[in-house]
Image (tube, helix red, strand yellow):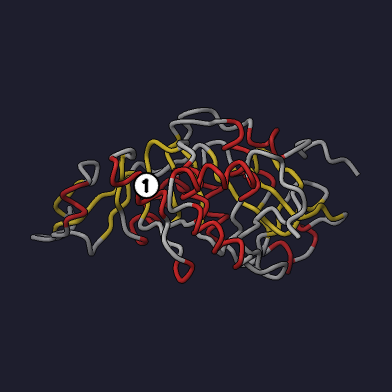
Amino acid sequence: MSQEWLSASVDELAAHVPDGAKLAVGVDNVGVAMETTRALIRRGVRDLHLVCVPMSGLQADLLIGAGCVATLETSAISFGEYGTPHRFHDALKRGALHIMDATCPAIYAAVEAGRKDIPFIPLRGLIGSDLVTHRPDWKIIDNPYADSDPILLLPAIRPDFALMHAPYADRNGNIFIGRRRDLALMAQAARHGALVTVEEVRDTDLMDSEETAAGALSALYVEASAVAPRGAWPLGLEGSYEIDEPHFRRYGELARTADGFARYLDEFVQPRRQAAE
């Protein structure tokens, strides 16, 4: 079977991303492209505009700590029960990031506008909040169809690329994402489509079956793909493997300080990672 759409390596996949690119990434439990993230750090990419759909955790903390991110657009950066995103907090305190604060509904709405290729989208629920004060790109107008009804307009989010990891691709480059529909939204909104790592390529056609087609991201929305077994590690991939909790705790200990974070990069990012046993 032809696999001409496959990149030779994750490093080759990451080479698609120029300095200053706008990247969409998902939450920690929805197919996070951690191997691509490490490749971007190894390459020394800079000045990224990171859009978290609608929030991020370890992926964002790594990119921020490595100095890859200039602008962060998100509703939150959180490790949940796994601790504190120390590199994000440090960059925030130092004023090293341009923060575009948002909410989950605002991020989803703006990315949906990008997917539909419309310039803006209306949203309720934020008028009167401090968020509107700190987002000059958000505009309040009068509802043209009603009296005394202000409405908030959000500019569309059109990332250059969406980064994601998925269980498998078929022989034609379609990607199985299952019920992870955030990934489809990100890919369809991206100007150049998705950069995808997969656990494996299967000799099948996802579009041949109603069941698998419903959970597939068409190759039309994929810029490039690469095979990366355990490519979400140390995060988990639903149905494949769980989060590596001991490693996550180790990261949390090291990332408390800049020196500890540098040691983490030397050990787990700068060398090409072997299998994460």
Q: Residue at x 80, y 60 (%)?
A: 208
* On screen, residue 127 above or below 174: below
Residue with the most extreme top position: 19
Residue 17 placement: quadrant: top right
- Residue 63 seen by the camera: yes
Report the front residue among 90 and 126. Answer: 90
The kind of residue tagged 1 is: Glu
Q: Which residue is mark 1?
A: 73
Residue appearing at x 49%, y 41% in the figure: 23
Q: From the viewer's perspective, tell me whether residue 109 is left or right of residue 224.
A: left
Q: Within 10 angstroms of label 1, few (less than 14), some, or many (20 or more) residues?
A: many
Label 1: state its secondary structure: strand
Q: Residue furthest right?
A: 1
Question: The N terminus lies in which quarter of the figure?
Answer: top right
234 left or right of 147 in image: right
177 and 112: which is toward the camera: 177
Which residue is at the front of the view, 201 or 151? 201
Q: Which quadrant holds residue 225?
A: top right
Query: Residue 77: image x %, image y %?
Result: 40, 56
Is residue 189 at least partly visible in the picture?
no
Q: Residue 45: image x %, image y %?
A: 53, 31
